[in-house]
């Protein structure tokens, strides 16, 4: 079972540059996900962390990717698997943010039906 609840908002709600914090509980673990919306699109990240969350469609997993400038103008990319967090949870946070859902969302996965 996955539960998602909005726990905070940053920025002016009338501005295209806002961020919403969502508490996601999945597989007995809690994650605070920050959904940022801005004039160029949107992004998901772990609240208080660096980088962006993305889903790997080949493996069905969620990763956090941090990109920094390295030596000789190269890029250092740190890609970390986020265990216990599913692509469905990330899609649900984006759905809640885009539809201004402030209540709790509960998703029953097949094993919990």
Image (tube, rainbow, N blue to C red):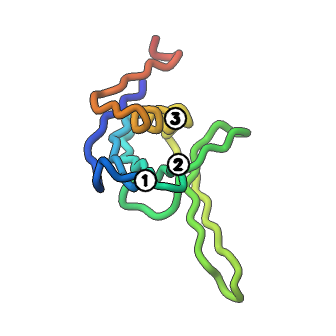
Residue at image coords 37%, 38%? 24
Residue at image coords 44%, 18%? 108
Res 27 seen here? no
> Which residue position is annotated with label 1?
46
First along the sequence among labels 2 and 1: 1
Question: Where's residue 9, x and y in %?
Answer: 28, 48
First along the sequence among labels 1 and 3: 1
Q: Quarter-wise, where is residue 23 in the image?
A: top left
Between circles 2 and 1, the one closer to the viewer is 1
Res 74 seen here? yes
Q: CA distance from mark 2 to mark 3?
A: 15 Å
Q: CA distance from mark 1 to mark 3?
A: 14 Å
Residue at image coords 40%, 38%? 97
Q: Name the element at disc 1.
A: strand
Confirm or deny contact between disc 2 and disc 1 (CB under 8 A): yes
First along the sequence among labels 2 and 3: 2
Crowd tier of the residue under label 1, counting other residues whose Cα lies within 10 Å: few below 14, some 14–19, many 20 or above:
some
Q: CA distance from mark 2 to mark 1?
A: 10 Å
Q: Residue at the far top: name it.
A: 113
Question: Where's residue 59, x and y in %?
Answer: 69, 39
Image quadrant for the N terminus?
top left
Please name whichever residue, 89 or 93, is drawn nearer the observer in this view of the structure.
Answer: 93
- Left or right: residue 98 versus residue 69 is left
> Which residue position is annotated with label 3?
91
Between circles 2 and 3, the one closer to the viewer is 3
Relative vertical location of residue 101 with respect to residue 69 in this rendering, above or below: above
Q: Which mark is residue 82?
A: 2
Between circles 1 and 3, the one closer to the viewer is 3
Please name whichever residue, 40 or 34, is drawn nearer the observer in this view of the structure.
Answer: 40
Q: Quarter-wise, where is residue 76 in the image?
A: bottom right
């Amino acid at each position: 079972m996955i539960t998602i609840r909005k726990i905070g908002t940053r920025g002016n709600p009338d501005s295209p540059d806002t961020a919403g914090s969502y508490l996601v509980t999945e597989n007995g673990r809690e994650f605070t996900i920050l959904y940022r919306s801005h004039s160029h699109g949107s992004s998901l990240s772990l609240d208080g962390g660096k980088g962006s969350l993305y889903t790997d469609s080949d493996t069905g997993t969620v990763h956090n990717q941090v990109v920094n400038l390295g030596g000789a103008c190269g890029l250092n990319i740190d890609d970390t698997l986020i265990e216990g967090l599913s692509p469905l949870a990330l899609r649900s946070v984006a759905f809640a943010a885009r539809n201004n859902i402030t209540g709790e969302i509960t998703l029953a996965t097949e094993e919990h039906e």
